[in-house]
Image (cartoon, rainbow, N blue to C red):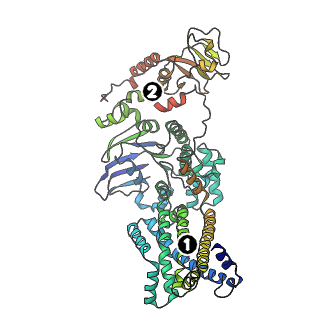
């Protein structure tokens, strides 16, 4: 079986033309990227608004959970019946799938900013916008980007449904293979989807390393170790040994 | 000057956090708001920079109602230090300190130069400026918090339990540092704490709050300990208030005595039959050699017992008594300002000096309400 998958993948005939791997891969990537960008455009501002103002948090949780429960294939079919366009209905369904993780990640990221930090930002005299952009957004980046990575993984996996409504993408190999019992083709298609997911996730992980401020990564490390850095050695201990501690205890 | 005029704060759920507060904080002093949790001390503080708005009454800073200013602009003129510092984790220490100057439109370069000066002012090496808050200890973070609050040189500084999250030794250092800074800067500081020891140490005036947001007493620390206004205050300032008051009594009347001393590394042979104070080459006390100790206990360091706290000449009486009580020999070691040995005192001598001071007219008024 492995041998068959490998020979299917390495067959030059499968690397050209409209049903070739490069073309299908690009189609798949195209749907994924467009849906991800749309989900970011919707989810990030909404998540920032709710996280910053603290308004509508409950409604948000309900909404995102509801959206997660929607079966994507069913949604595509329903939208197709309403809109009549396969492309639009597929994209809308994918966006609906991708918005919840982005929204939840952004919201959680803003909420995750330590209370004291937000209080200090306000007390220093930052306006609401300044606090959002200078404090809450940078502090939200780890969870926000985590949400986006999550969304992209789900998108890569789910974009296979595009094939079910007659569109392209790597789902074609799975669907077409199943129809004629060509299992190596099915498996190769699935493998390609998985490989694309891994590559995209690695790229986003790299991006996360670049974007997340260094101070936050250090803070995460300190938190894992439990607590703050050690007090520095006190200088000028010109006191009889042990006296400092005792003086402190009863001071 | 900060004035609270009939200020009441009632929260939406009906709880009254502050009840008809009338109080004025003198310019250039440290005023401490102290009380148990839920007494409205923090709420009162936060009404000064409009982090909380009063339900009734008005808060005035230098004669102007704070509500007349835009909150953000008002806050840039009022320094703000909070518990656990609240430093921005994603910014370097230097950029944290430069926050308010940058908000006020300074150039980045000028703001950073200023931030560097402030790190020095609060006793931190300037190299720390390049680090991130997570790389600092709790005490260092608090210092940065103070530096950040002082960056735009505001006349007023609000400090909300600034030192309560650090360990007692570091806390004491920070308190001393604050007093040193204040002697230099002369700010109007409102300082909130639940710790009465901290309140009487740091405050030039202390406002004691009680549950329900009532002001129970507003007085100088010495007065507060000597004459608590009512049972609540006397209980709150605690059983040790007689002892604490020693912090405000100077110990100039104490006569020092001499005690046999020996150099570290060159202890007398045979060991004498009395306590010997061991000094190092710079005359700094290292510990006590017990009477009649034997040479064969091993190393010299094992033989020498660690001493008690040291009393620095010219500081309040409390330190002298503590030095005597904490010393294994019963003799409190007195040092000069450079930490060099100056003499010893016994607890009896300190108590005698205290009695003498109380007999003097300005310290000798009979105590009232002294049942705590």
Chain letter belonging to callout 1: A
| Quadrant in which the C terminus of chain B is drawn | top left
User: With A15 as the anchor, is B321 left or right in this view?
Assistant: left
Residue A232 among magenta residues: yes
In the picture shown, does residue A87 fall above or below B239?
Answer: below
Residue B253 rendering spot, x and y as whole percentages? 48, 19
Q: Nearer the viewer, residue B349 or B220?
A: B349
Chain letter belonging to callout 2: B
Residue A134 among magenta residues: no
Q: Can see residue B252?
A: no
Residue at left 38%, top 33%? B223
Mark 1 Cα within 10 Å, few/some/many (few <14, many 20+)?
many
Q: Nearer the viewer, residue B115 or B92?
A: B92
Residue B238 rendering spot, x and y as whole percentages? 36, 33
Residue with the mark numbered 1: A152
Label 2: state its secondary structure.
loop
Label 1: state its secondary structure.
helix
Residue A213 rendering spot, x and y as whole percentages? 60, 60
Same chain for mark 1 and mark 2? The answer is no
Q: Which residues are magenta?
A: A228-234
Mark 2 Cα within 10 Å, few/some/many (few <14, many 20+)?
some
Residue, far right:
A12
Residue B62 rendering spot, x and y as whole percentages? 44, 52
Q: Can see residue A72?
A: yes
Q: Which mark is residue B46?
A: none
Residue, far bottom:
A84
Specify the quadrant of the image occupied by residue B12: bottom left
In the picture shown, does residue B171 fall above or below B295?
Answer: below
In the picture shown, does residue B303 fall above or below B166?
Answer: above
Marks 1 and 2 sit apart, C-alpha to C-alpha, by: 70 Å
Residue with the mark numbered 2: B249
């Amino acid at each position: 079986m492995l041998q068959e998958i490998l020979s299917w993948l390495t067959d030059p005939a499968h690397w050209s033309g409209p049903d070739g791997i490069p073309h299908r891969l690009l189609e798949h990537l195209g749907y994924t990227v467009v849906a991800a960008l749309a989900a970011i455009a919707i989810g990030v501002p909404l998540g920032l608004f709710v996280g910053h103002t603290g308004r509508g948090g409950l409604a948000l949780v309900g909404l995102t959970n509801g959206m997660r429960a929607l079966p994507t294939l069913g949604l595509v079919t329903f939208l197709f019946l309403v809109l009549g366009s396969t492309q639009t209905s597929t994209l809308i369904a994918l966006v609906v799938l991708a918005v919840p993780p982005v929204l939840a990640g952004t919201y959680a990221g803003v909420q995750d900013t330590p209370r004291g930090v937000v209080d200090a930002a306000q007390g220093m005299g930052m306006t609401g916008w300044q606090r959002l952009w200078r404090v809450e957004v940078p502090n939200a980046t780890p969870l926000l980007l985590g949400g986006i990575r999550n969304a992209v993984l789900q998108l890569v996996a789910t974009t296979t449904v595009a094939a079910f409504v007659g569109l392209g993408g790597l789902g074609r190999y799975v669907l077409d293979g199943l129809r004629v019992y060509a299992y190596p083709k099915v498996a190769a298609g699935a493998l390609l989807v998985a490989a694309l997911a891994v590559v995209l996730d690695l790229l986003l992980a790299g991006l996360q390393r670049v974007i997340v401020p260094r101070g936050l990564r250090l803070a995460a490390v300190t938190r894992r170790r439990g607590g703050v850095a050690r007090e520095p050695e006190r200088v000028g201990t010109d006191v009889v040994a042990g006296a400092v501690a005792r003086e402190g205890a009863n001071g | 000057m900060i004035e609270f005029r009939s200020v009441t704060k009632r929260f939406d759920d009906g709880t009254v956090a502050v009840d008809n507060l009338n109080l004025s904080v003198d310019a250039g002093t440290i005023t401490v708001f102290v009380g148990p949790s839920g007494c409205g001390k923090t709420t009162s503080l936060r009404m000064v920079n409009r982090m909380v708005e009063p339900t009734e009454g008005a808060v005035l800073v230098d004669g102007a109602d704070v509500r007349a200013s835009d909150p953000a602009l008002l806050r840039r003129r009022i320094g703000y230090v909070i518990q656990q510092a609240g430093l921005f984790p994603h910014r370097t220490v230097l950029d944290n300190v430069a926050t308010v100057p940058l908000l006020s439109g300074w150039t980045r370069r000028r703001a950073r130069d200023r931030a560097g000066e402030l790190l020095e002012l609060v006793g931190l090496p300037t190299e720390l400026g390049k680090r991130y808050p997570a790389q600092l200890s709790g005490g260092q973070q608090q210092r940065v918090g103070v530096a950040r609050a002082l960056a735009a040189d505001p006349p007023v500084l609000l400090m909300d339990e600034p030192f309560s999250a650090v360990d007692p030794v570091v806390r004491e250092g920070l308190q001393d540092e604050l007093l040193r800074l204040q002697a230099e800067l002369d700010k109007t500081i409102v300082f909130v704490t639940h710790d009465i020891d901290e309140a009487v140490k740091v405050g030039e005036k202390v406002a004691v709050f009680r549950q329900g947001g009532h002001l129970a007493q507003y007085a100088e620390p010495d007065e507060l300990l000597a004459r608590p206004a009512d049972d609540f205050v006397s209980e709150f300032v605690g059983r040790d208030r007689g002892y604490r008051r020693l912090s405000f009594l100077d110990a100039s009347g104490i006569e020092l005595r001499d005690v046999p001393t020996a150099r570290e590394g060159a202890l007398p042979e045979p060991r004498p039959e009395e306590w010997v104070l061991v000094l190092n080459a710079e005359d700094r006390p290292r510990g006590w050699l017990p009477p009649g100790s034997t040479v064969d206990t091993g190393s010299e360091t094992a033989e020498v017992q660690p001493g008690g706290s040291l009393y620095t000449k010219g500081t309040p009486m409390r330190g002298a008594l503590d030095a005597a009580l904490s010393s294994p020999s019963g003799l409190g070691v007195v040092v000069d300002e450079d930490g060099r040995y100056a003499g010893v005192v016994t607890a009896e001598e300190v108590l005698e000096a205290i009695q003498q001071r109380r007999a003097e007219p300005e310290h000798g008024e009979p105590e009232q309400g002294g049942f705590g």
